[in-house]
């Protein structure tokens, strides 16, 4: 098949949606499909996409990046619609698969409709969160910005208690209602999308291309500490600061030398996290690093830590960790894929509950070993072949004009 993948986000920005997008493009190309990537023009190379003979990059120029969110500013204009339409015609694309909700994607929808192509939308999160004051004026600003970017209004369903959350979720709902099929990487998000009125929602978990076999678990006896890795954007919704507090509580309980924590990532809360961990020799801030270094850090750990609550859909951290044979400490009971057998769920999302879970794992090396043993089976749903097979089936049905058979899990 000849598939066009589209994303409004900068592919250089650290985020799960970008990582999933790049990985899925490679997996589809590895499976024999011709893949055209339509995305904002990167300012640095993207080797994962540039070195594959079955992937063609079709960059879209933009005037500036919105500083606070790292979003390239691309509006749904007649010129962008023509540019995307020309790419779709030239590459003889049979389907457009979008991974975001903003101006470029809306232009893509229009271009695909004019070309008679089906459109798929992957929803990377329906759980937008925006805390803080001035909710109503901020929600009005979200709606105004969305209208300006996309040249259309949005739905006004009650999708959250906070006005900004509701506005952002309506932004996603508005875009999803235009698609021929919606993909959710997780079953729990799919349930929320269906509850919001969407019908054709298919559950296809994310994937990651990892060639190496899982490394043996590091020792966790005697002088060898429990090694933890926290990976993600250092922002409020990922809850790094509560995690740092949990490490402080756990280290106080366990004593010196029992923990070693690598914090991998960058973001606006990094400075505050460094300050909070200033007196904790257990914590090392690695910063933003490439995929290979991330994989080495995961493999040298006993578990990874996922501390978001009520925000994530199907985190790439989970996918990568389980494929590398590592379990996950997490706090959100809604998250299920891979974590039922390979996760340790803290009994609450607060620092004290996370600390209790960390202490229990540190005091019982069998916990990490059991999770690693379970990872081989749990990894099956995240394998590239699984993703490629499910996606190819969905694409084939849409191209043939058949109804989508949404897998309800």
Image (cartoon, rainbow, N blue to C red):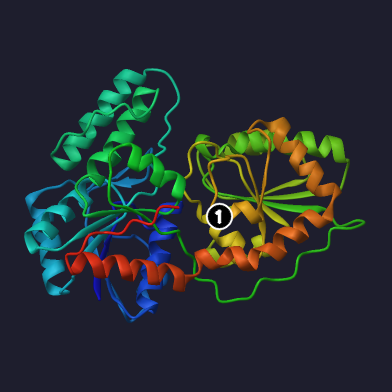
Q: Quadrant of the N terminus?
A: bottom left
Q: Nearer the viewer, residue 190 or 175?
A: 190
Name which residue lies at 69% across and 32% down.
Answer: 351
Q: Where on the picture, by quarter, is residue 292?
A: bottom right
Crowd class of label 1 (few under 14; some 14 to 19; many from 20; radius 10 Å): many
Q: Nearer the viewer, residue 52 or 308?
A: 308
Indicate whether 128 appears above or below 203. above
Q: Position of residue 198 (x, y in %)?
A: 28, 43
Would residue 128 be found to the left or right of residue 325 on screen?
left
Name which residue lies at 38% across and 37% down.
Answer: 68
Would residue 282 be found to the left or right of residue 191 on screen?
right
Q: Position of residue 279 (x, y in %)?
A: 77, 36
Indicate whether 406 appears above or below 190. below
Q: Where on the picture, by quarter, is residue 387?
A: bottom left
Q: Position of residue 247 (x, y in %)?
A: 74, 39
Would residue 332 be found to the left or right of residue 178 on screen?
right
The answer to whether residue 277 shows anywhere in this view is: no
What is the secondary structure assignment of the residue under circle 1? helix
The answer to whether residue 75 shows anywhere in this view is: yes
Query: In this view, which residue lies farthest toward the right?
Result: 222
Q: Nearer the viewer, residue 350 or 22?
A: 350
* Residue, disc 1: 317
Name which residue lies at 32% across and 24% down.
Answer: 138
Q: Position of residue 105 (x, y in %)?
A: 22, 52
Indicate whether 56 appears above or below 328. below
Indicate whether 326 appears above or below 67. below
Would residue 185 be found to the left or right of residue 82 on screen?
right
């Amino acid at each position: 098949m000849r598939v066009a993948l589209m994303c409004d986000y900068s592919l250089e920005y650290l985020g799960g949606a970008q990582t999933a997008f790049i990985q899925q493009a490679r997996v589809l190309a590895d499976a024999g499909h011709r893949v055209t990537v339509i995305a904002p023009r990167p300012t640095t190379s993207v080797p994962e996409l540039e070195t594959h003979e079955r992937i063609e990059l079709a960059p879209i120029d933009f005037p500036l990046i919105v500083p606070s969110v790292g979003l390239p500013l691309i509006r749904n204009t007649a010129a962008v619609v023509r540019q995307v339409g020309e790419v779709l015609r030239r590459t003889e694309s049979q389907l457009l698969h979008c991974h975001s909700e903003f101006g470029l994607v809306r232009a893509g929808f229009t271009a695909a409709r004019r070309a008679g192509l089906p459109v798929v939308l992957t929803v990377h999160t329906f759980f937008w969160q925006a805390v803080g004051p001035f909710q109503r004026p901020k929600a009005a600003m979200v709606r105004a910005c969305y209208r300006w970017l996309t040249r259309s209004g949005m739905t006004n369903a009650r999708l959250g208690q906070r006005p900004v959350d509701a506005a952002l979720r309506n932004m996603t709902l508005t875009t999803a209602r235009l698609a021929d099929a919606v993909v959710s990487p997780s079953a729990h998000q799919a349930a929320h999308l269906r509850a919001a009125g969407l019908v054709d929602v298919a559950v296809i978990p994310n994937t990651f291309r990892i060639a190496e076999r899982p490394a043996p678990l590091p020792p966790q006896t005697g002088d060898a500490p429990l090694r933890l890795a926290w990976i993600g954007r250092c922002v409020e919704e990922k809850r790094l600061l509560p995690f740092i507090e949990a490490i402080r509580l756990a280290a106080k309980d366990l004593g010196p030398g029992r923990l070693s924590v690598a914090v991998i990532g960058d973001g606006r809360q990094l400075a505050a996290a460094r300050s909070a961990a200033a007196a904790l020799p257990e914590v090392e801030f690695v910063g933003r690093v490439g995929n290979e270094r991330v994989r080495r850090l995961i493999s040298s750990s006993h578990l990874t830590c996922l501390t978001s609550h009520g925000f994530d859909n199907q985190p790439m951290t989970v996918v990568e960790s389980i494929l590398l044979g590592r379990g996950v400490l997490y706090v959100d009971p809604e998250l299920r894929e891979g974590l039922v057998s390979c996760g340790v769920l803290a009994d609450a999302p607060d620092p004290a509950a996370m600390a209790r879970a960390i202490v229990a794992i540190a005091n019982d090396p069998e916990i990490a070993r059991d999770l690693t043993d379970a990872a081989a089976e749990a990894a099956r749903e995240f394998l590239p072949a699984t993703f490629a097979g499910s996606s190819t089936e969905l694409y084939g049905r849409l191209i043939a004009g058949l109804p989508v058979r949404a897998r309800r899990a």
